[in-house]
Amino acid sequence: MEPDSSRSATPATDPRPVKSSGYAGLLGFSNSGKSSILNNVTGRSISAVTGQPFTTRTNVAGLTTSAGWQVCFIDTPDISRVLDHPVMTWLDVYCLVMDSRRIDEQMDSMEVSRLFELSRAGALPVILVLTFVDYFPDSLKPALLHQAALRRDFAGLLSCCPAQGGGGEKLLELVVGQLPRREALFPDDCRTPHSERFLVGEQIRTQLYRVLPPDVASSTAVQIEEFSFRDGKTYVRANIHVARHSSKGMVIGRKGATLQRISDLASEASRALLGKSLYLDLWVKVREGWPDSEGDLLEFGYVC
């Protein structure tokens, strides 16, 4: 995903209101809760959420807008894959999402040190978002934030439990307070800059983790081959690529039952997200060893 061209001057024929507007990157290690936070603050299931590491394979964006501000949150893959990516050059705020059970380990990591180097170089704020705080008694949560504040210079700190819907309003408040005043980046009714084609592909991929064994789901890729409108419905033909021949039968299931369940779940999730009926035509194909092929990763859009 590339930054929106509306950062530059907007034509006088289509003026956009001046607001506190900008891009906030959700940065952190795998399984820290970045995708859940994106879905929480936008109120939509845009990004895939599973219990498996490295579920997010590319940058996923969602918008939240009010009369006075607009924030485009960017859910990113593991921080080790993002720090040298061009997305870092056009973020306005860094939101460091950190598992509260691993503060010492993650705070001293090379990746977090590098993030603060980028922050100082670009004079950009870093907001700490501590997740998985529900593992601790309420009386210890302030101490966790205090511990983190002593370790690094944060522009703001909060603890949250995005899976339970907590912390979103506070995060928005902290982010908006750091954003510049500029013309809105997107129209007010825009919820994500991604295409419907991309969003449906992510919904299909999410359901793979619900139905398949974790090792099979994590080694599958979804590629939308056709996205068209037929007979009052959006027709989607998608290929589910597995990395091993032995996985193909598991995805299809007995008499196609597993594949049908994936299709039903993905259709329902896509309809809820997009507000329209879909017809999914899913096919399972073998792309031997695709996770280790740079060409395949690039083709599937999984190179960050």
Image (cartoon, helix red, strand yellow):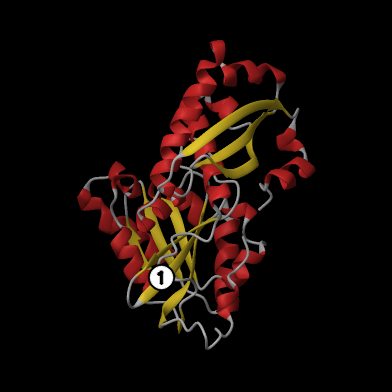
Residue located 60% across and 57% down the image:
110
Judge from the rendering whether residue 160 lies leftward or rightward of residue 86; answer left or right: left
Q: Which residue is mark 1?
A: 188
Residue 184's spot in the image, x, y percent? 46, 77
Q: Nearer the viewer, residue 102 or 70?
A: 70
Residue 289's spot in the image, x, y percent? 75, 30
Residue 41's spot in the image, x, y percent? 36, 58
Q: Nearer the viewer, residue 139 or 8?
A: 8
Q: How many marks?
A: 1
Judge from the rendering whether residue 210 lies leftward or rightward of residue 142; answer left or right: right
Mark 1: give few (<14), some (14-19) or many (20+) Cα within 10 Å.
Answer: some
Q: Nearer the viewer, residue 81 or 296?
A: 296
* On-image quarter of the N terminus: bottom right
Residue at the farthest front position = 231
Residue at the farthest left position = 139
Judge from the rendering whether residue 213 lies leftward or rightward of residue 80; answer left or right: left
Residue 164's spot in the image, x, y percent? 29, 45
- Does residue 138 appear in the picture of this structure? yes
Instruction: Tell me: residue 268, above or below residue 86.
Output: above
Under circle 1, the secondary element is: loop
Instruction: Tell me: residue 215, above or below residue 2.
Output: above
Give the residue type at disc 1.
Asp
- Does residue 55 appear in the picture of this structure? no
Residue located 42% across and 39% down the image:
269
Residue located 57% across and 85% down the image:
9
Q: Quadrant of residue 144?
A: bottom left
Residue at the farthest bottom position = 12
Instruction: Tell me: residue 147, above or below residue 29.
Output: below
Instruction: Tell me: residue 15, above or below residue 270.
Output: below
